[in-house]
Amino acid sequence: MLADIFCKRVDNYGDIGVCWRLARQLTAEHGWRVRLWLDDLPAFCRLAPHADPHAERQTADGVELLAWHDAMAALPPPGDVVIEAFACDPPPAFRAAMRASRPLWLNLEYLSAEDWVASCHGLPSLQADGLAKYFFFPGFTPDTGGLLREKGLSAARDAFQRQRGAQRDFLAGLGLPVPVLAQWEAGALLATLFCYPDAPAAALPAGFRAPALLLAPEGVAPGLDGGAAAPHGPVTVARIPFLGQDDYDRLLWCADLNFVRGEDSFLRAAWAARPLVWQIYVQEENAHMEKLQAWLARYNPPAPARALIEAWNQPACADAAAGRPEVAQALAAALAPPAWDAWRARAIAWDDDYARQSSLAERLVAFCAKHREKG
């Protein structure tokens, strides 16, 4: 099976991250040949540092990568399956070729826990040119498109989380100073921070009432800066490099608590089986808050953790100088026993429940096979 996956970077890295994970999984686990079309190769290379940001065509991890320009003169013929990520629409010349070869055309949608997703998943949309495009909705229930999760992920994670020495070597490789590593070895709570610019990150240090390390990539939450490893009371804020996908997974596995954003890092934090705080992508008319509540209903964290996640996603106040004391208070309450113990147990149970479901890639392959049989 040959698949073309088209991906346009909108404003962050989540779109590219989802497409890259899917392309690699279809190749490695299902034997598909995949061409991944990318309109922003330099951004992609931040997630896959071994790729060449200047190559028009290359192969990485068994996936063929193509630099996507709408004005491309010479295009390969469409594969058996064409996947447009998040309604990005293939280039006009490629779509014209699709009218002749009639591949199965899917629109991979954004992830949502809302109930309506199941009723729309798999539905066709007849286009003006006679082609049919099918909506493929990721989701949390068996009647949706499922969630991206590789085979063997749990085993790899569990093995890494059992090896304290391997975790230390990994953290040291991120450039953390020896005194910072010593704090971690002495039992300081390890938290990671990956958030949007409007997150109330400045409120976090006041919420940690015991020794903690807060690791944030360069450029994220610049208001926390104070040096390579800056102390904020019992908290040390340390800067780390922006990581490729595989190393980011390991970072999440090392942490006790992960603050994440968007779709890709959110799911990877869930698969770490550790407590997470999700900053959802803002949409018009506060539609994102409905999505957040739909997920919280499924995640079902302890009340203090839920209060923290809700506070983290509230719009910024008009007076920035007023700060966000409610965020610090909610964090302190969520980290206090027995709420923290209950949150940790819930994170493990959540991961275990969804690890039993078939993955997005498996459901996508089955969907395509079913349509080929109909022929």
Image (cartoon, rainbow, N blue to C red):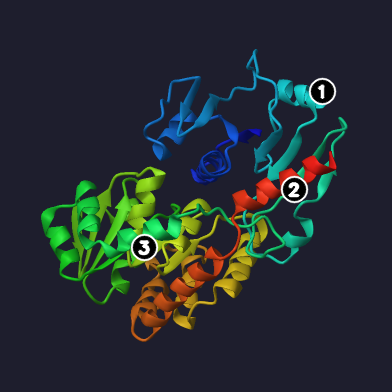
Foreground pick, 28 / 334:
28
Quick one: 200 or 13, which is closer to the camera? 13
Secondary structure beneath dot 3 equals: helix
Three-letter amino acid code at the position of disc 2: Phe
- Residue beneath the point at 40% across and 54% down: 194
Three-letter amino acid code at the position of disc 3? Asp
Determine crowd level at label 2: few under 14, some 14-19, many 20+ residues with C-alpha closer than 10 A.
many
The answer to which of marks 1 and 3 sits earlier in the sequence is 1
* Towards the viewer: 22 or 188: 22
Figure quadrant of residue 258 = bottom left
C-alpha span from label 3 to label 2: 34 Å
Instruction: Please rate how many residues cluster around mark 1, counting C-alpha atoms within 10 Å: few if below 14, some from 14 to 19, many from 20.
Output: few
* Residue under numbered circle 2: 135
Instruction: Identify the image quadrant of the N terminus.
Output: top right
Quick check: marks 1 and 2 in contact, CB under 8 Å? no
Per the image, the residue denoted by label 3 is 158
The answer, for residue 254, to whether it is visible in the render is no
